[in-house]
Image (cartoon, helix red, strand yellow):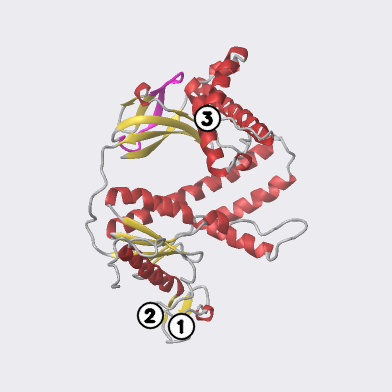
Amino acid sequence: MLTGRRYRVEFTPEQAEFTELIADTCRAVWNTALEQRREYRRRGCWINYNEQARQLADAKNEHEWLKQAPGHCLQQTLMDLEKACKTHGTFRVRWRSGRRWCPSFRFPEGGKIAVERLGRKWGRCKLPKLGWVRFRWSRALGGAVRSATVSRDGRYWYVSFLVDDGVKTPAQHRSTSAVGVDRGVAVAVACSDGAMFDRQFTTPGEAERYRRSQQRLARQKKGSANRRKTIAIMREIRKRERDRRADFNNQTAHELASRYRLVALEDLRTRNMTASAKGTVAEPGTNVRQKAGLNKAILAKGWHQFEVALQNIARYTGTEIVKIPAAFTSQTCSRCLHVDSGSRESQARFQCTMCGYSDNADVNAAKNILAAGRAVTACGDLGASRSAKQEPTAA
């Protein structure tokens, strides 16, 4: 199956300069093509990738700076734009800003990419127009390279290889147990068997340094060297936070997928849940500050990233992932199935107003998720009135 391998790159000064040039060219092509698509939509017309790729080939004859970047990198940029417009809509796709966008571009032809190991810590790869590039050999490649993506995160450049490792999904998991998982704000992951997984992604010292950097940034002049230094410090703190969150989600997902055959999750729409509550000028929102704090707490736990990591590792373990509706899972008693919002006494405590059952609120919700997940697997689906796996009722 296809998987990713990411390594930190050590460019020479000439390669770093040329990489910045390729990234700037891809960003310019993205913004120009997006503006063209929006203008076509305003006129009631539509333009697709094929037409824009043809116009890009003609534009190379008029603009020499387009010829400096690899042509297939520019074509991949147009393909990504096509996919983004079809998924989100032309007017919802964002521009790529020179200050906010993290530069990245892709080499799609794996046959033209050669990878060699130089020693215990170093390797090198040959990329079109860049030549041989050194990178830190932090793990084995493990398969044939299909494509390579060069990106920058903070002050470092990385190369990500799409690799076909030849592994197939097991027909059956080695275990027969199941677990329900509740994602929360107080605890990142709570399981139906009582296990809880959580971690602080930012230390108190980093939080204080970030707060002081924000204050210093507000007093600095835009475009100054000191302002750029302050922004670099803030980005480095956020990068460490993202790395810790990704590491936590991957480790937790690996542990759950290795131990359980069935993992039941709530079907959470994180993007909708973290939408702003400001509203409009005519109809302003209510409890805006409280909603902003909740949005920040949800995004800090990485709910969607954990779900993606779980789906990724499930391909190797054969784990079945079931999503169920999230309505009333935190208000339902897992013992008597009585639904009452008053049973949720606090963020961490649940006590049923009917039978008196008491448990951790997140664990009780995880038990309800597990019961609903087992019901889904027993009936086959949620959408049909009667699943094909169900026995027909007597006439």
Q: Which residue is mark 3?
A: 77
Residue 181: x %, y % from top left: 40, 64
* Other residues around mark 2 within 10 Å, as few (<14) / some (14–19) / many (≥20): some
Please, what is the three-letter code of the amino acid marked with disc 3? Thr
Q: Is residue 155 left or right of residue 311?
A: right
Task: Determine whether the residue tagged by mark 3 lies in a helix, strand or loop.
Answer: helix
The numbered disc on residue 352 is 1
Q: Which residues are magenta?
A: 126-141
Q: CA distance from mark 3 to mark 2?
A: 53 Å
Quarter of the rendering occupied by the C terminus: bottom left
Are circles 2 and 1 on residues that touch, CB within 8 Å? yes
- Of the two numbered discs 2 and 1 on the same chain, state the one appearing first in sequence: 2
Foreground residue, 53 or 347?
A: 53
Q: Which residue is mark 2?
A: 335
Indicate the secondary structure of the residue bearing disc 1: loop
Is 27 within the magenta? Answer: no
Instruction: Say left or right for 212 vs 21.
Output: right
Q: Residues within 10 Å of mark 1 (few under 14, many from 20)?
A: many
* Residue contact between numbered discs 3 and 1, judged by CB atoms under 8 Å: no
Q: Quadrant of the N terminus?
A: top left
- Residue at point 51%, 34% (across, down): 80
Q: Residue at x 38, y 71 (%)?
A: 367
Residue found at the very far front of the displayed protein: 395
Residue density around tag 3, few if under 14, some if 14–19, many if 20 or more, within 10 Å: some
Q: Position of residue 243 (x, y in %)?
A: 46, 47
